[in-house]
């Protein structure tokens, strides 16, 4: 199932609190990879590929959510999987990484990892594909751009090195997911994207990302305008209430003087 990357990044949010985000991205020369390969939660990210066993991804993330270390979680799943020799499985959690390529995966296949990321691929034009993915991510790890954008950059580098070798299969797909421990008021629209059937998966995933980012900017601007309007209406209503109270006090004072005169 071509090539993918899983990453972990620690960062400081706007409130000064330390947070962790996890991301996974994948592309292949088959449709619908986003339903099969990438899995993530606020506790880690997992990619399952080659002869895909989707349960390795689903259960892998579930085990991470239960508190298991990524190495223990994924290795235990492989130990119980009779088809493990044909699988590729890799991922990250808050503390570690895990990579596995079964001996019956189809070549070229292999994997690599760094302190906070893993990359794996099969049916590739060569090892240079996963090297390019890893090197591109490392070059801008923790950069200013959102993680989703940097994951697309990493996939693009692998694609440019040749990517999936099955050129006879024109219909391709790509996907990415990003999750974080941060409790955000707005979840970015670009943190869960899929391009299910296209001949230009990386370009289309980038275009989808850019459209989602632009859509979020529009929504946030409108939200800010509505919030300003609400504050303005509240201020006008408060000012009106103050004017009414001032008028009532003046009228009462005038009435009081009249009554004093009558006495």
Image (spheres, rainbow, N blue to C red):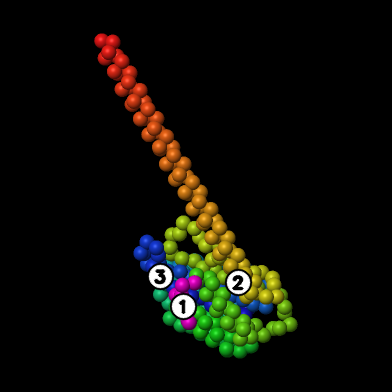
Which picture quadrant has residue 84?
A: bottom right
Which picture quadrant has residue 215?
A: bottom right
Badge 2 marks a residue whose secondary structure is helix
For marks 2 and 1, give the CA distance: 18 Å
* Figure quadrant of the C terminus: top left
**Residue at image mark 2:** 206
The part of the chain drawn in magenta is: 138-145
**Residue 188 located left or right of residue 31:** left
Q: Is residue 100 visible?
A: no
Callout count: 3
For marks 1 and 3, give the CA distance: 11 Å
* Lower sequence index among marks 1 and 3: 3
* Figure quadrant of the N terminus: bottom right
**Residue 213 located left or right of residue 248:** right
Q: Which mark is residue 141?
A: 1
Q: Position of residue 119 (x, y in %)?
A: 53, 81
24 or 99: nearer the viewer: 24
Indicate whether residue 18 is drawn in magenta: no
Furthest-top residue in view?
263
Q: Position of residue 45 (x, y in %)?
A: 50, 71
């Amino acid at each position: 199932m071509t090539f993918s990357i899983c990453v972990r990044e620690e960062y400081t949010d706007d409130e000064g609190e330390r947070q962790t985000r996890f991301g996974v991205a994948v592309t292949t020369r088959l449709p619908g990879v986003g339903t099969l390969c990438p899995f993530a939660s606020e506790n880690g990210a997992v990619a399952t590929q080659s002869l895909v066993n989707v349960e390795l991804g689903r259960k892998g993330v579930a085990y991470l959510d239960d508190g298991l270390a990524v190495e223990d979680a994924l290795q235990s799943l492989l130990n119980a999987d009779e088809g493990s020799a044909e699988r590729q499985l890799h991922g990250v959690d808050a503390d570690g990484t895990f990579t596995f390529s079964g001996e019956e995966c189809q070549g070229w296949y292999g994997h690599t990892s760094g302190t906070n990321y893993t990359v794996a691929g099969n049916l590739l034009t060569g090892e240079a594909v996963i090297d390019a993915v890893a090197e591109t991510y490392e070059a801008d790890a923790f950069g200013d751009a959102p993680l989703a954008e940097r994951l697309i950059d990493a996939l693009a580098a692998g694609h440019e090195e040749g990517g999936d070798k099955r050129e006879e299969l024109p219909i391709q797909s790509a996907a990415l997911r990003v999750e974080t421990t941060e409790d955000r008021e707005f979840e970015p629209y670009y943190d869960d994207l899929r391009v299910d059937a296209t001949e230009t998966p990386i370009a289309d995933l980038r275009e989808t990302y850019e459209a989602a980012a632009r859509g979020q900017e529009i929504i946030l601007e409108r939200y800010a305008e509505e919030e300003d309007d609400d504050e303005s209406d509240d201020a006008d209503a408060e000012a009106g209430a103050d004017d009414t109270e001032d008028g009532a006090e003046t009228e009462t004072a005038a009435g009081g003087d009249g009554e004093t005169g009558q006495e």
